């Protein structure tokens, strides 16, 4: 709520049960090495970029399925280190998220790391009510909560696939009307690290656009930008 948090553990290991979805995500094993050097370098650059970032290695720091799922399906078996960065969706805005991304980019450069950035979160993010949602669990986009949200998602997917990241950033006030998850902080932090409006890397779809009980979901991959890369 009051700062960005970056995990700075040497190792995180255990069993994960989601507090949000315990029926479907129960006792999932995880075991990965962290990167305290990168975490502390990022935190130390918060002030320079006009924001607040704190490195936390408390073993009781909660995990969330946005991290565990990514590691389970993309990281298991790799000789890689993992850190997680929170967002400040309760208090932050577009500029705050971009500033955090700038600090991440400079920390990557300082520590000479080769880093894959994974922005984990939805597009439009308004659920159906509890009494209605079981009628809208199918993945068909017609179940997206509103026509306005579905249209806004489609517009941004087209811009992302064309590499027009400047358009996505510049129209955030309009997109916020359909409640992108966490104010789209996950994407904005990633773009802040890559060069913001200067980034022109086209997106490649790794999934269809789908519904999840009213929210817009899609996987997109962006190659390393040829220009605008800051780290």
Image: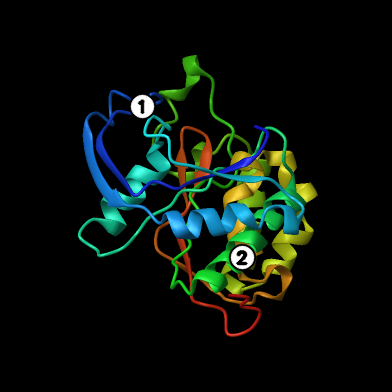
CB under 8 Å between discs 2 and 1: no
Image coordinates for residue 51, horizontal then vertical, percent = 72, 49
User: Label for residue 21?
Assistant: 1
Nearest the camera: 36 or 28? 36
Nearest the camera: 1 or 223? 1
Q: What is the quadrant of residue 161 in the picture?
A: bottom right
Nearest the camera: 15 or 156? 15
Nearest the camera: 197 or 4? 4
* Labels 2, 1: front one: 2
User: In the rendered image, which quarter contains the N terminus?
Assistant: top right
Sequence order check, earlier mark of 2 and 1? 1
User: In the rendered image, which quarter contains the C terminus?
Assistant: bottom right
In this rendering, position of residue 71 left or right of residue 168:
left
Q: Residue at x 49, y 45 (%)?
A: 141
In this rendering, position of residue 83 left or right of residue 203:
left
Query: Which SS class for mark 1?
Result: loop
Q: Residue at x 74, y 59 (%)?
A: 48
Q: What is the quadrant of residue 90 in the picture?
A: top right
Image coordinates for residue 146, horizontal then vertical, percent = 63, 36
Q: CA distance from mark 2 to mark 1?
A: 31 Å
Image coordinates for residue 212, horizontal then vertical, percent = 45, 38
Image coordinates for residue 87, horizontal then vertical, percent = 60, 43
């Amino acid at each position: 709520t009051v700062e960005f948090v970056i995990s700075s553990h040497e190792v995180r290991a255990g069993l994960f049960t989601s507090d949000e979805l315990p029926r479907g995500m129960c006792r999932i094993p995880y075991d990965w090495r962290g990167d305290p050097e990168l975490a502390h370098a990022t935190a130390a650059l918060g002030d320079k970029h006009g924001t607040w970032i704190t490195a936390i290695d408390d073993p009781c720091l909660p995990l969330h399925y946005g991290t565990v799922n990514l590691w389970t399906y993309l990281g298991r078996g790799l000789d890689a280190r993992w850190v997680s960065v929170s967002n400040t969706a309760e208090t932050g805005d577009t500029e705050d998220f971009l500033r955090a991304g700038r600090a991440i980019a400079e920390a990557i450069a300082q520590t000479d790391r080769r880093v894959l950035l994974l922005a984990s979160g939805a597009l439009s993010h308004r659920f159906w009510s509890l009494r209605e949602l079981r009628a809208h669990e199918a993945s068909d986009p017609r179940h997206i909560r509103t026509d306005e949200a579905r249209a806004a998602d489609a517009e941004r997917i087209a811009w992302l696939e064309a590499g027009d990241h400047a358009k996505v950033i510049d129209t955030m006030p309009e997109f916020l009307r359909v409640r992108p998850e966490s104010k789209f902080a996950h994407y904005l932090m990633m773009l802040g690290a890559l060069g913001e409006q200067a980034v022109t890397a086209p997106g490649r779809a790794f999934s269809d656009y789908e519904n999840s009980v009213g929210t817009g979901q899609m996987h997109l991959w962006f190659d390393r930008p040829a220009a605008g890369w800051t780290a």
